[in-house]
Amino acid sequence: MKLKKLQAEQAQRAAAAKAELARRLAEADAEQARRQAEQARQQAEAQAEQSRRQAEQAEAQAALEAQAAKDEAECCQLELELLEQEERGSQPRSSTPSSVAGLPVVATEPPARVCVSQQTDESVTRTRQWLAQSQPHVPPVYTAPVGTLPPPAMRLQRPSSDDNRAVPHLPRITLEKFGGSAIEWPRWIALFKALVHDRADLTDVERLTYLQTHLTGPAKESVRGMLCDASLYSTALGELEREFGDPSRVIHATMKRLLTARPVKDGDLSALTELSRELHTAVSVLQCLHYEHDLAAATNVTTVTGKLPASLAWRWGEHMVENGITRPTLVDLDEWLRRHVSAGRLALNVTTKQLPKVEANDAECRPRRVFTTTSARPTPAAVKRERTAAIKSSAADGTQ
């Protein structure tokens, strides 16, 4: 009886576990189907949005092309009207009627014709002004009435050789984004002021927009609250100069790059060149900002000298003794290291140029390679041959 009861309970538990498992599987399938449906909906919305944007761009492009064609047609029509009016104005007037019965007849132009002529001249003037404004890149052309000559200055004018030469176009300057590096600040702010800040045709709204789009990282975070109103443009620019344009920060960042440069191994010309560049940059910045005490600091000179290999540091000591330098500065070390790097490059170039000549020489002129053999372990075949020869020699001795 108890056994049947236990079996019934086990069967109930198994059925309940199967039902729970089926329920969980159904929920998992439903969740997966819901996610797939959500992804499909998002993809469809993205495709629809992309199609809508493409359609708007195509419509805008078509509208621009239609407007350009309309403007061109109006310009051509106005040019034709201008030419017709000039032709009508340049036609010769009718001859004066002859005198009748010996009495002279005074030829007077009707007032209406004078008014029409004045209106025509005003229309021609307005049309020319409109054409000059609509085509600013086209040089003005002198149009004289039929049968007349241009002014003497225009008749004597001839195109010079300088006009025929093509004017070279400089590459377009791109303003990069500033992220808060103190080393990049002087170059970036100088370029920003030349391209944006100093332009008189820009408003503070446009300047603030350019400033916002060309900031990133810590630089953008420092003035995030000042980019909401154009009246705060000068305040935002001043805050950037106060935080990132501090000369002490520029000096600290420059010296940090120099003092943390990797040591140079003996014979590594590329690493020595990199160290020389970092040293020259630091010296130039310190001289520009008038930090002479850092240039003459013995700690800085000792730290940079410690990055040189032992042989090169020895040569630096010889240079100091030969020139009587008792208190060396970074300027002295920079001048000496630049000369040494230039000499190393020159020696490397001369060696590289001489290599093909050596390879092109005759085979007889090349040094012969001498290979020496060392005692090696004998092969099994050699051991077998030696044993066979020893057995044969012992057998021959026994026969004798």
Image: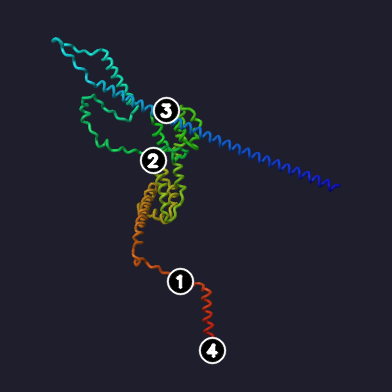
What colouring method underlies this structural image?
Answer: rainbow
- Label 4: which residue? 399
Residue density around tag 4, few if under 14, some if 14–19, many if 20 or more, within 10 Å: few
Q: Amino acid at mark 1?
A: Thr
- Quote the CA–CA distance across marks 3 and 4: 123 Å
- Mark closer to the observer (1, 2): 1
Residue 341: where, in percent of width, then height?
Answer: 38, 52
Can you tell which of label 3 and label 4 is closer to the viewer?
A: 4
| Quadrant of residue 85 within the rendered picture | top left
Badge 2: residue crowd in 10 Å (few <14, some 14–19, many ≥20): few
**Image location of residue 288, percent across then percent down:** 39, 40
Q: Nearer the viewer, mark 2 or mark 4?
A: 4
Residue 126 placement (x, y as % from top left): 32, 21
Q: CB of mark 3 within 8 Å of CB of mark 4? A: no
Q: CA distance from mark 3 to mark 2?
A: 33 Å
> Which label sits in the foreground, 3 or 2?
3
Residue that mark 2 sits on = 288
Q: Is residue 350 left or right of residue 26?
A: left
Residue closest to the eye, 312 or 70: 70
Q: CA distance from mark 1 to mark 2?
A: 66 Å
**Residue hosting label 1:** 373
Circle 3 residues within 10 Å: few <14, some 14–19, many ≥20: few
Earlier in the chain: of badge 4 and badge 1, it is 1
Q: Are marks 3 and 2 in contact (CB under 8 Å)?
A: no
Could you say whether the residue bearing mark 3 is in a helix, strand or loop? loop
SS for dot 1: loop
Disc 4 to disc 1, how far (Cα)? 40 Å
The relative height of residue 348 versus residue 240 in the rendered view (above or below) is below
Answer with the quarter of the image where residue 281 lies: top left
**Mark 2–mark 4 CB contact (< 8 Å):** no
Report the amino acid beneath label 3: Thr
Residue behind mark 3: 203
